[in-house]
Image (cartoon, rainbow, N blue to C red):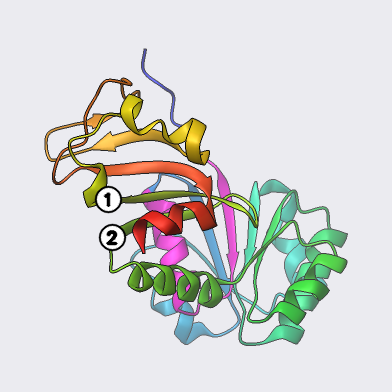
Amino acid sequence: MKVKKIKKSILIIGLGKFGRYLALKMQDFGNQVMVVDKEEAESQKLATKIDDIFIGDCTNEEVLKSLGVTDFDICFVTIGENFESSITITMLLKKLGAKFTVVKTGSELQSELLRKIGADEIIYPEKELAEKLALKYHTGQSMKSYLELNKDYSIIEMEVPQKWIGSSLMELDLRKKFGLNIIAIKNSNSVNVVPEPVESFREGDVIVVVGQHSTILKYIS
């Protein structure tokens, strides 16, 4: 059965590098994207790539009203370098009934303030990138990708540890001994999302594992 692609209506306010990359990627996914910046020069950088571009100062409530913010599924505020404007726009979006607001921030203090005024989600890209890079190079680059579930648990894509090669999931008994769950095994030929207990790990395998950060790090660092 073919899965119907769900399109979203996206508003992106602020066209620094992060906002531009976000706009282009959201459009690549087939979403309807409107971008807004008060500087015409920034808007022109996307003029040939994004159809719906608006030049205006979104700290002005009348400008936001004219955009019809309630019509958008997600409103992104990506003005991380001007926190006063970011706060003002976020407050106005909530006042005008925006369905879901995602705000880019540059510090923990800013994050706390944004939460208090009602931002639905806060992104701190510099911190997130730094944490992922630190983990990747701490582990000798055996880690491929990383998703933090909460302060204790993660999903990590990593090269299979050398000491596991030749052993099966049943033999290692990772869930019972260490609380680790292998949810996929990838190699050059295939991706196995339901690995059998008797399947043995091979050289070159990449695994997707769920478990506590501290436990996983014992095996990949």
C-alpha gap between disc 2 and disc 1: 9 Å
Q: Earlier in the sequence, mark 2 or mark 1?
A: 2
Viewer-side residue, 63 vs 32: 32
Q: Tell me the quadrant of the picture where the N terminus can be found.
A: top left
The kind of residue on which mark 1 rests is Pro
Q: Which mark is residue 142?
A: 2
Q: Which residues are magenta?
A: 6-28
Q: Say which quarter of the image contains residue 101.
A: bottom right
Residue 193 is at least partly visible in this image? no
Label 1 sits on residue: 161
Looking at the rendered structure, the secondary structure element under dot 2 is loop
Residue 28 at x, y percent in the picture: 36, 51
Viewer-side residue, 84 vs 157: 157
Viewer-side residue, 85 vs 66: 85
Along the horizontal axis of the image, is 117 left or right of 52?
A: right
Asked whether residue 102 is drawn in magenta, I would say no
Are dots 2 and 1 in contact, CB under 8 Å?
yes
Dot 1, how many residues are within 10 Å of its Cα: few (below 14), some (14-19), or many (20+)? Answer: some
Residue 152 at x, y percent in the picture: 62, 54
Residue at the (55%, 85%) spot, across then down = 39
Residue at the (32%, 28%) spot, across then down = 171
Residue at the (69%, 47%) spot, across then down = 71
